[in-house]
Amino acid sequence: MIRQIVLLLLVSVMLSACSEQSDRFSTYTEGQQQIGNINNLLSTQLDNGGKTYWPFSEAYLQARHLAYQGLANVELSDSQQAQLNYLIIAQRYPERFFVWPVQRDVISNAIKQDDYTPEALGKWIERVETKLIEAEQSNLRLNKLELKLLRSMVISHLDNNNENVVMALTKLNQYLAQYKPRTKLGLVGLANGKDWYQSKLNYFANTTKPPLSWLSEIQHLLKEKPTVDLSLPVFSSHNKPLVLQYLEDGDLHAGLDWQLDFIDVKQSKRQLNQDEQYFWSVMMETDLGIHYHTWNVQQARVNLMKRLSVNQQQADWLIEDIVLYPAMSFIFAR
């Protein structure tokens, strides 16, 4: 009897070990492609083949974690290793509670997948609400901008032709209608938000420096204002961060982050002219103001309009980009 119990325990341990094994990749390209597949519903490049991973579902989180572990065993360049380390660290922070990233239209992407079913979509929508409720209990809330964008996305899909999907969306919309967003716009308003922001600064700026040191350096650079002549794009959505408009034409390096369209931006960025460098210095200053110094929309708007001579519509669009893509402007830090 004891021997049977021991054997059962051994089998259980072996099965558990097998289930935790990381993916095996021979090259960075294999791992990068797998991470792209896992994030297929968060991609701007539609690929309707393969398995659908619903964002921040248990299957998604496990598959992504195993892919990261697999890449850790592959020979990587310094830039590739830095991006992988950044994404591994990000797993500690609260993004998994915010199941529907407001930058991407997950439902439209899902409906185009070969293995799409309304039942799976309905369950995922229910998970969005469940995780938001769990987040509230941990003092983690969407900010006003995120709430506005998410509710707008939900409402835009209420004409879905499946009754169960519409019921799930209606229930989520009712929940969002009474949702109390956090008062602080930036990451500082979240539990561990300052640490999360610092990790982003460290990665995108490619150096470890506290926000106050960054602010002092940036404001010193901004003392001499050039005659800025920039044509600022204002798009209808934020499915791609503005930094992607300032990359080297043609030769882009493959990356691991869906928010950056799977481009290694630090390897792909180009040299900026004087006006462009001034613009991004202002964006960095405003980024620090929002995500570290708790600036509200009005404070950020005034700073951008004063520094860049932009109109209110342009300023508000830039604020949205900063809120949705924290610290990414520091790609262009000197």
Image (tube, grey):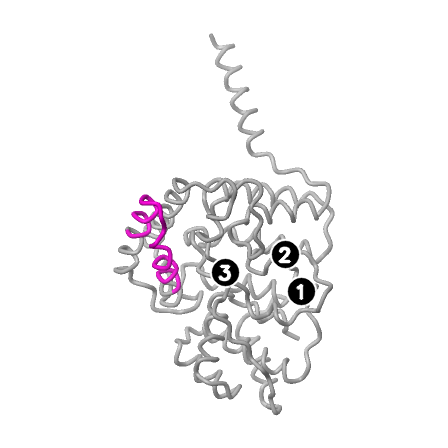
Identify which residue is drawn at 54% across, 49% down.
39
Please tell me whether residue 301 is drawn above or below residue 13 in the rendered image.
below
Query: Which badge, 1 or 3, is on the more N-terminal residue?
Result: 3
The residue mark sitting in front, 3 or 2, is: 2
Question: Secondary structure beneath disc 2?
Answer: helix
Vertical placement of 309 versus 71: above or below?
Answer: below
The amino acid sitting under disc 1 is Lys
Residue 163 located left or right of residue 242: left
Q: Which residues are magenta?
A: 149-170
**1 and 2 marks in contact (CB < 8 Å):** yes
Residue 218 percent location from the top left of the image: 58, 80
Element carrying mark 1: helix
User: Residue 50: percent from the left, percent from the top?
Assistant: 57, 41
Secondary structure type for disc 3? helix
Name which quarter of the figure residue 264 lies in: bottom right
Contact flag, marks 3 and 2 (Cβ < 8 Å) = no
Q: Residue at x 49, y 52 (%)?
A: 109
State if disc 3 and disc 1 touch (CB < 8 Å): no
**Gap between marks 3 and 2 measured at Cα:** 15 Å
Which comes sooner in the sequence, label 3 or label 2?
2
- Tell how many labels: 3
Question: What whole-number distance in Å separates the C-alpha atoms at marks 1 and 3?
Answer: 19 Å
Q: Is residue 151 magenta?
A: yes
Crowding at dot 2, Cα within 10 Å, few <14 / some 14-19 / many 20+, comes out as many
Q: Quadrant of residue 188?
A: bottom left
Residue 266 is labelled as 1
Q: Which residue is mark 3?
A: 196
Judged by its main secondary structure, the magenta piece is helix
Q: Which residue is mark 2?
A: 83
In this picture, is 286 found above or below 5?
below
Query: In the rendered structure, which disc, 1 or 2, sits on the residue that comes first in sequence?
Result: 2
User: Residue at (51%, 19%) from the top-left corner?
Assistant: 9
